Amino acid sequence: METSFARLLSSFLKEWAPESSSIAIAAGDRYVKYIPSGHDLNLIEGQLVPKGSITEQVYLQKERVEGFVDKSVFGTSYYGIGYPIENFDSYSFGAVVLIFPPDFSSNQSSSLSFITGKHENCWKPIAVEEISYIESKQKKTYIYTHNGTYSSIFPLKTLELQLPKTFIRIHRSYIVNISYINQISRDLSSNLIVVLKDPEELTLTISQTYVQQVRRVLGF
């Protein structure tokens, strides 16, 4: 049942997702790929997506979902973080879910106070409050501050789990420091965009995948 796209996606996720997480990929009403790791739900490829699972919640809300799920769903409780995938192969919708032990919480792990960035041949610890936004581009991660641009060895998915709630994911390529948002408006195509204070008047597009999450967090 696994497709070539699912194989490609699972290969990417094994490289970029936290090592402690099992990974479940769903398309339509079934799981098409499962990669067990530290906390194993013993999912079977081809298994139906059950009610009450993080996957079902992603399907219903069509946005990033995270939370605790008790053992009534899979026989083992877990903490899941799910992401929607639009136009997944021949399906209109799919989901990727990172599976952690039940006592895990992304809030507990959001303890980064600095990120070490590299500029030319020097490394510098950067306080998170100095970061305006973080970008993933051509499989590399870039940190933008008032004093310059730095590269990081960590992918966006890892940083998203560890950054404080003052940061918000707005696009598969961008995480933004809310303190640096000057305004949110619409471009000529009616897409929501974030206008940052620093770099001056830089605009970043909010992708449809993250619109509802951004609206909920920022309250508009």
Image (cartoon, rainbow, N blue to C red):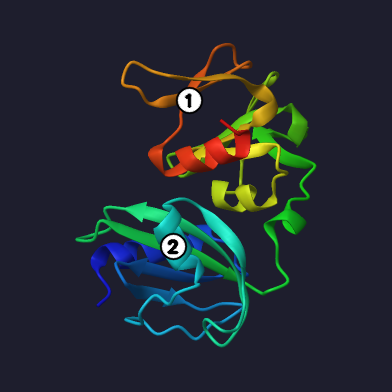
Q: 93 or 4: nearer the eye?
A: 93
Q: Position of residue 130 (x, y in %)?
A: 74, 27
Provide the residue designation for mark 2. Answer: 96
Q: Position of residue 7 (x, y in %)?
A: 32, 68
Determine the CA span between mark 1 and mark 2. 24 Å
Query: Where, quadrant-wise, is the N terminus in this rendering?
Result: bottom left
Q: Secondary structure at mark 1?
A: strand
Tell me if 169 is positioned left or right of 47 in this view.
right
Tell me if 135 is positioned left or right of 2 in this view.
right
Q: Amino acid at mark 2?
A: Val
**Location of residue 146 with respect to 110 vertically, above or below:** above
Residue at x 25%, y 69% (from the top left corner) = 3
Q: Which mark is residue 204?
A: 1
Q: Which mark is residue 219?
A: none
Category of crowding for the residue at label 1, using alpha-carbon neighbours closer than 10 angstroms: few (below 14), some (14–19), many (at least 20): some
Could you tell me how many numbered marks the image carries? 2
Residue at x 40%, y 85% (from the top left corner) = 44
**Location of residue 150 with respect to 55 vertically, above or below:** above
Of pointers 1 and 2, the one earlier in the residue sequence: 2
Q: Position of residue 150 (x, y in %)?
A: 63, 31
Residue 10, by quadrant, is bottom left
Residue at x 53%, y 65% (from the top left corner) = 98
Q: Amino acid at mark 1?
A: Leu
Q: 110 or 55: nearer the eye?
A: 55
**Location of residue 185 with respect to 85 vertically, above or below:** above
Tell me if 44 is positioned left or right of 117 in this view.
left
Q: Secondary structure at mark 2?
A: strand
Query: Where, quadrant-wise, is the C terminus in this rendering?
Result: top right
Residue 2, by quadrant, is bottom left
Observer able to see residue 75 = yes
Category of crowding for the residue at label 2, using alpha-carbon neighbours closer than 10 angstroms: few (below 14), some (14–19), many (at least 20): many
Q: Position of residue 108 (x, y in %)?
A: 76, 58
